Amino acid sequence: MKKYLLFVSLLVVGLLAFAAPLKVAFLYVGPVGDDGWTYAQNLGRLYVQNYFGDKIQTTYIESVPMADAVNVLKTLAQSGYKIIYTTSFSYMEQTAQVAKLFPNVIFENCSGYLIGPNMSAYFGRIYEPEFLTGLVAGAMTKTNKIGYVAAFPTPEVVRGINAFALGVQMVNPKATVQVVWVNDWYNPPTEKEAALSLIGAGCDVIKSETDSPAPLQAAGSKGVYCIGYNTDQSSYAPKTFLTASVFDWGIYYKNDIQSVLDGTWKPQNFWGGLDTGVVNIAPMSDLVPPQVQKLVNAMKEAMKAHTLNVFAGPIYDQSGKLMVPSGQNLSDQALLSMNWFVKGVIGNIPK
């Protein structure tokens, strides 16, 4: 009997050793070589593939058009993928639609808000490092004109512009932030043109919020300071790069996949800030004076400790109307639907 039990135990161990890996898929809105949003997402995929090793098997499909998302998601679910990450707000509705058809597959949408029994939403409070980069921009401008190359007029982007402008205003109340919309996440020629138009208008610091390094390259070619987004893009403008707001998706993906492997996964709406490590500010270049770096680092630690809130009142909109009274903070609900610019921002939000 003991020998039989030993045999059974060894057999179970053997079967577990050869258990099929958890299949994990990623849907990307752009190319992995964009050195921006999708590149950062793919770094997260590579991190978890290396971290978990044979326990998981990952794949990705890049530059998926919105119109094709439903069919691509169905194909992945039918192919045995048990976790599917759709890494753009653009895929939220399609993800929710397909999730209902495959209740045994976990679906997760980045930057959206819809959740369900087998669907989570996740994002990072990138507006926190955006505020920090605003401190840098406000301290470095000489013309008091700062340019912001923005993708789409969504609450996410508006929120980031406002946080950046609040950082600028904190150190330099005379400075303004001029916004140019490119109406695309990834369009290097248009992004470059937008940056050059802002430089032509007298902006001596360019902030990028789009997915390619084109705005930074344009700024670098003109000897203009620049601040990046998504990843540390310093190599594209080594002589004028100041810093960047960056994501570290590997942290989220590691914890999330581990919960699936442990059998503890539950749907959630994750929105992590600097305290989680999912968002951060890239190392500041030597162009940024030590006293400015000291201020930025102090503000960063205060936000991590939750003693500083970016959207604490008083805050006024472009027209001078008081939007957040002193002693109050904007709620997450208000942040997620933000459709107005703070004082100091030049530009409109297209309807």
Image (tube, helix red, strand yellow):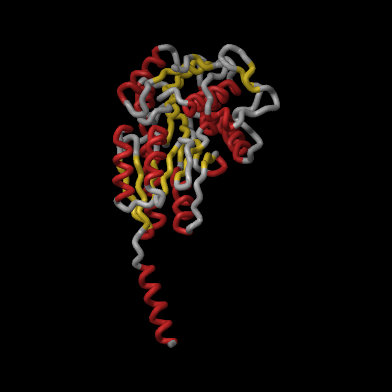
Please identify the quarter of the rendering in which residue 311 is found. top right
Residue 327 drawn at (x, y percent): 70, 27
Above or below, comparing residue 31 to residue 341 in the picture = below
The residue closer to the viewer here, 30 or 85, is 85
Above or below, comparing residue 179 to residue 38 in the picture = above
Q: Residue at x 42, y 18 (%)?
A: 180
Above or below, comparing residue 266 to residue 159 in the picture = below
State whether residue 234 appears in this view: no
The residue closer to the viewer here, 176 or 239, is 176
Locate residue 185 relative to residue 315 in the image: left or right.
left
Locate residue 316 relative to residue 23 in the image: left or right.
right
Q: Residue at x 34, y 29 (%)?
A: 186
Residue 211 drawn at (x, y percent): 37, 31
Q: Residue at x 52, y 33 (%)?
A: 129
The residue closer to the viewer here, 116 or 166, is 116
State whether residue 281 appears in this view: yes
Please identify the quarter of the rendering in which residue 60 is found. top left
The residue closer to the viewer here, 298 or 305, is 305
Q: Give the residue at the far right of this rendering.
A: 327
Please identify the quarter of the rendering in which residue 210 is found. top left
